[in-house]
Amino acid sequence: MDKKLRKFNLFFSSLKDTFRLLKRNKIGFIGFLILIFIILMSFIGPYIVPFDTTSRLDKIYVKPSWEHPLGTDSQGRDILIQIIHGGRDVLIVAFLTGLLSTLIAVTFGSLSAFIGGRLDYLITSLADIVLTIPHFPLLSVLAAFIRLKSSFMIAFILALLSWPGLLRAVRAQVLSIKERDFIEAARALDLGTSYIVFSEILPNMMNYIVISFILSMTSAVYAQVGLILLGLVPLASHNWGVMINFAWTRGAIFYKNSIFYILSPIIAISLFQWSLISFTRSLEEIFNPRLGQGV
Amino acid sequence: MESILKIEDLYIDYRVRRGLVKAVRGVSLEVYKGETLAIIGESGSGKTTLGLSIIKLLPSSARISQGKIWYQADGKKYEVVSLDGGKLRKFRWKEIAMVFQSALNAFNPVIRIWDHIVDTIDSHDVKITKEELRTKVLELLRLVQLDPDRVLRSYPHELSGGMRQRVLIALALLLDPNIIILDEPTTALDILSQRSIIELLKKIKKELNLTIILISHDLSLAAELADRVAVMYAGSLVEVGSVYDIFYRPLHPYTLGLIKAVPTVSTSFRELISIPGSPPDLIDLPPGCKFHPRCEYKKEECLREEPKLIGVFPNHYVACYRWEKIKDGKNN
Amino acid sequence: MGDLKRELRKIAGSVILKRFLKSIFTILVVVTLTFFIIRLMPSNPIQIYINQLISQYGMTYEEAKTLAASLFSIDLNRPIILQYLDFLKNLWKGDLGVSFLSRGTKVTSIIKEFLPWTLFSVGVSLLISFTLGIILGMLIAYKRGGVIDFIITSLASILSSIPNYLIGIMILVFLGVQWRIIPIETMRGSLSPGIKPGFTLTFIKDVFFHASMPILTYVISTIGSWILTMKSSTLSTLGEDFVMVAKARGLKESRITFSYVGRNAILPLFTSLTISLGFIVGGSVLIESIFVYKGIGWVLWNSIHSRDYPVMQGVFLIITISVIMANFLADLLYSRLDPRIRTSGGE
């Protein structure tokens, strides 16, 4: 019982340390805060602020005011509320894609590096091939055949294309760790391949895995919003991508007063991307303290 | 003995996050024409910083807060600390050439060795025809015992570490400098390459009339090549003297410790004594003599004020209050 | 003669050949996958088209099948393996089928008409973006910590996080609609009506006029990462021993900056060049559609929307093959520039 309590305290104090280090890189910290804000807004916001879908034709494209901080859209609906509701799908797909592709990349990357030989050659060749094919055209063509109805399906397809980059990097990391002494020791103790891979190598790569996960989220957002814009994903729910699609297909882009309708989702998406990338940069600094150290 | 280099009361600091690193503290040293001077010290003693300051090649975080460096040869006289821009650039390599520790990465990987030579010539006002240059280069490569055909057309990565070290030495001699500074010339090499570089340096010393400054932590290198030795500790000189004085009549506890720590063929295990403790933090130096925390001869006065470098015998200087005790002690 | 033999032997055993074969193999894999996906997917387009023909035009199954087969340039009656080989044979001959929509137009002629515009805009953009990016990147590496560094780094960081098509939309919205700086209506298409192709000034001016917004979009969206990568590469090169030795040798500042720092700092960026190219070409599907710039990306978008499968298949193959070939060329260029790769033959 005491052991568990100690482990908990240790975990907590290491979190506090990480938080303190996070604050060192100011821009990364701002990115982190924005990220947390967007996550909270997208998942908790909708419960606080319900989405009123009734059209009010007397309030089309109203300029921002206290009542409608971001103005209204072509049907008189409040834009800010749409932004609050619009993040959830995007974030869920991004997260799922990140999860799936990181899972694939880490599992197969480390196995490939650790076992080596023909398996390694096969997997790396496959990764190279998928890597050289331009992703977006392939995704567009696939979307024409497969109806991407659920978030999970979209995430699955996206993950199928984004694992090679991560796999290569994971493989390189494992290859370098593989030669280290404590692995030799584990081998000498005859501890079994899967044990060595999962209990010895991976914990040392946690930092790296987290960063790769976050970066794959950014490419998932790019692909997902792109597909939505092209109309290749059924526009069932009302998310940021759908808002931009509507703006484009319904001519809002060419109309002068609708600028807030078009800009709001763009800024929301860009802010999300930026916060992810900047958070990654400060994570990199934390995990690799020698970078950015100017003597 | 004519003086070619005179360092006067030099102070160099580095600015780091934690504070100010006092790398060189009040060093005054004279180098005579044609001699081989070894500056000996452990890591962090300031010897490399001192060497770099002679050609004013310090990193931007470093600052020469005080002092002068006088260079005088062939009727020319320069004060290095005040040199800047084009004058400093032309001064480097032509008057004084510095060969760094790691020749492994001393060359531009994407151009050939011959291009390095051409680069060097082009950057200085040297009136030389292509023919004369070719002859000179062949001569220099022969001196360092390298095959010109093999070396000149190659890229740096095609040559071994030892070969690169030799090429660098040949390159250093290209503009007939008056002083050549070698910073840890043998440290990065395997033992056979070390031996051949030492022999090469002996040969150069004999055949060319050069002033050589050797910077190293390796006392045995000094024993082989140096005429005079200057021992550095925590940014200042603790003992300066002829190589015989330093080895047979050391006067500073640190020098004594260094000598006792070098194994010789006849040393048994029991006789090897390393100096206990570690070098001081250059940001936060102890008061008085900087060596006192590790010194077995220390007395009260050693903690109060730092001893100055004084000439206690002809051409033999020491910065220690207890030098007489050490002199007697060794003879026991 | 002996020199030639030596050169040939060098090429044969070299990394270049291996990379070339790998590219060819990748192309083969893509072609095979495309073929099988189109034929074997549950909602396979040929089947759909046949059903369409039957329901819309009242054809019999046989008639529909024959028509569909001819449009795709395949023979549906033969076993699938032979169909695959026929497909490869046709591909080699340059026969990619006929468009569903505009029946009578061969896919290859569609590609011939629209591909050059994309190649042009992507090529020019990459050139501008790379060149400006490395110059700026190197500049701020040298002036590290200054105001210029902060401004450019922040801008680069922000620009590189925004998806390129969103930048395109913003350019359209701000420059075209809000501030009316550019005449977006007349900028549609890749060429103004009535202008004849040729090496005339009017033609060249017109081409750039139409391609300017896509090029601007590509450049703005990619320059950020070039700047940041070059900055970090230059900073790490500046810390290398040979740069300090070069200064000790009294080399001229300009020589050090270009031939010592520059040439070495640029090398790692060449691997990013291939990724960047694939990415820009991928984004062309969206960006050309936003600006209605009639290149191959726009064609792909149209063909997907109108379910014009032969065109979709053909364009997808061409895009992929072009990118793979371009990657190979970039690898080639890199090996020319870095002598360490040339002779060691390692990966």
Image: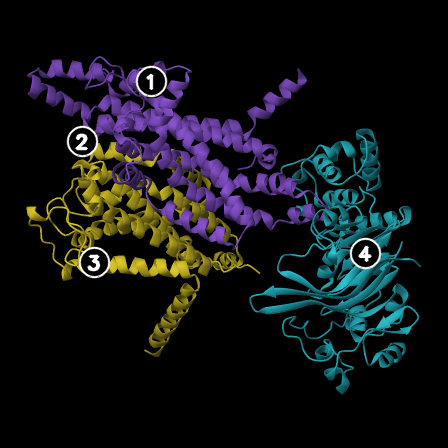
Chain colours: A yellow, B cyan, C purple
Q: CA distance from mark 4 to mark 1?
A: 70 Å
Q: Nearer the viewer, residue B42 or B232?
A: B232
Q: Amino acid at mark 2?
A: Pro
Residue C14 higher or lower than B166, as above or below? above
Position in image of residue B304 (x %, y %): 73, 84
The image shows residue C62, relative to residue C277, as above or below, that is above
Which residue corresponds to mark 1?
Answer: C112
Question: Is A163 in front, or is B176?
Answer: B176
Q: Chain of mark 1?
A: C
The residue singled out by tag 4 in the image is B213
Q: Does the rendering let one see residue C225?
A: yes
Give the CA distance from mark 2 to mark 1. 31 Å
Give neighbour class at mark 3: few <14, some 14-19, many 20+ (Cα, 10 Å): some
Whether A182 is drawn above or below C329: the answer is: below
Mark nearer the viewer, 2 or 1: 1
| Residue that extends furthest to the bottom in the rendered view of this protein | B300
Mark 4 falls within which chain?
B
- Picture layout, residue A23 above or below residue C325: below
Which residue in the structure is indicated by mark 2?
A: C42
**Marks 3/4 same chain:** no
Q: CA distance from mark 3 to mark 1?
A: 49 Å
Q: Are marks 2 and 3 on the same chain?
A: no
